[in-house]
Amino acid sequence: MSNQKTPPIPGPLGQRLRPAYQRALLPWLFVLHSALPRIFDVTTSALLILLFFPLLALRAILAYRETGLIFNRRRQIGLFQEEFDRLSFAGKGPGKSMALLLNVLRGDLAWAGPRAVSPEELVNLPANALFRFGVKPGVISLFLLRKKIGLAYEDELATDHEFYYSASAKDHVGLSLRGVVGSVLGGGEPRPAPPLLNFWGVEIVNTTMQEALEWIDRHVMEQQKAFMAFVNPDCLNIAYANEEYLKVLQAADRVLPDGIGINIGCRMLNQSLLANVNGTDLFPRLCEHAANAGYSLFLLGGMPGIAERAAEAMRQRYPNLVIAGAHDGFFSARQEPKIIEAINDSGAAVLLVGFGVPKQELWLARNHAALKPFVCFGVGGLFDFYSGRIRRAPVWMREIGMEWSWRLIQEPGRMWRRYVIGNPLFIYRVWRQRQQQQA
């Protein structure tokens, strides 16, 4: 007889049940937990079919009258590499994808899962990607959701791997709901993605997170000095009214896009943003690059002790990382030469400055010639997040483009003007720019 113990049922239920009852219930709870995603898919797809039945019937009639067919069928690969027909209504007009409700109901697709692939794509998939066929493909893919919002920093294989090995029944439902919201905020079909985006004279490089990191690496390795900046709608609103800050951004070696607002602005101008290359998401990846390549960072800004705590947190995450120095942002004009001297003496290759916009960019522009680090850029309140002083929005909020609302809830007194007034003002100014371009 095996001596292996049955793991206890967690939570209040497990505390109230005797071990014998726990052993009896555990297999059934496991089956129920495994079945929850399918129960959710069947229930929601059936309800949606009933709710929209008149529209579905009308769309089917129109398709048949136009083409003699109700459905277009596209062969795709599903669970355990079984083929199925992905349905869409035949003919032209809106609502073609509503036929996917039938695929979800009959079990070809789940609401959430890896993207379904074609038989041609299956042939070219690497062997380490075949794990994705252990779950049903999804109408909503974690990778495609992040890509639409601009947060797909890892490739599709890595993101599918994350979903496959970590997704629970709760995550399945959550991703399904996030996909609906993300589809609204992230926009529909992709638009042209020009290399440069322009908002009232500020040119923003339309690039990926990986390319941005490689750009920093290259400037460090080639010992080329560069000044970089990040802009979100609030930054652009400030630049609209502050000519000095506008000129600093125009003179920067590179300006990168930060936030869902830039994504929305691009769509208004009929453009696509390749990625939300914000400093907060770039920072840990930069630390990893620096640790691997052997160059060091200097953190300047924040309240006393905050930059040091952020530095220690990154050292714990990346043991080979060298942070050559850290200092708060509270120093006088008389102390400034000593701060610059400390930065230069540290031998840091990259300087991150967290004074807030536009102070950090104006300070860097004024002292750029005197600073020795090869790459310098402002990071706003980044040190607060990585020191633990301020908690960052949960991943699910970032995936639907609602991180700004989290910041507003955390600091309403400081953030209300930026978001409640600033966001609509930014949208209005982008609208005016579009009207001028079309005139």
Image: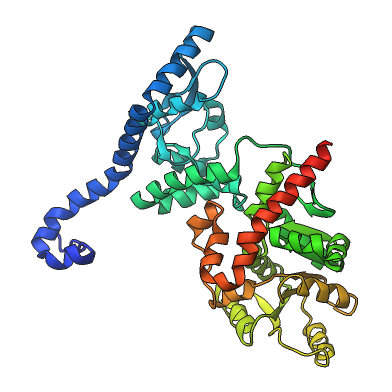
Residue nearer the viewer, 433 or 346: 433
Residue nearer the viewer, 92 or 437: 437
- Placement of 81 over or under 177, stated as above or below: above
Residue 378, percent from left and from top: 74, 70
Q: Is residue 148 at least partly visible in the picture?
A: yes
- The residue at the far bottom in this view is 334
Residue drawn 61% across and 72% down? 414
- The image's colour scheme reads rainbow
Name the side, left or right, on which 268 lies relative to 401: right
Q: Is residue 319 at least partly visible in the picture?
A: no
- Say how many tags the image has: 0
Residue nearer the viewer, 95 or 118: 95
Residue drawn 79% across and 64% down? 228
User: Which quarter of the image is occupied by the C terminus?
Assistant: top right
Name the side, left or right, on which 128 lies relative to 216: left
- What is the quadrant of residue 121 in the picture? top right
Residue drawn 69% across and 37% down? 191
User: Which quarter of the image is occupied by the N terminus?
Assistant: bottom left
- Placement of 271 over or under 297, stated as above or below: above
Residue drawn 42% across and 22% down? 56
- The residue at the far right in this view is 369
Residue 374, percent from left and from top: 83, 71
Name the side, left or right, on which 122 lies relative to 198: left
Residue 162, percent from left and from top: 48, 52
- Placement of 215 over or under 387, stated as above or below: above
Residue 97, percent from left and from top: 49, 27
Residue nearer the viewer, 322 or 227: 227
- Placement of 174 over or under 136, stated as above or below: below
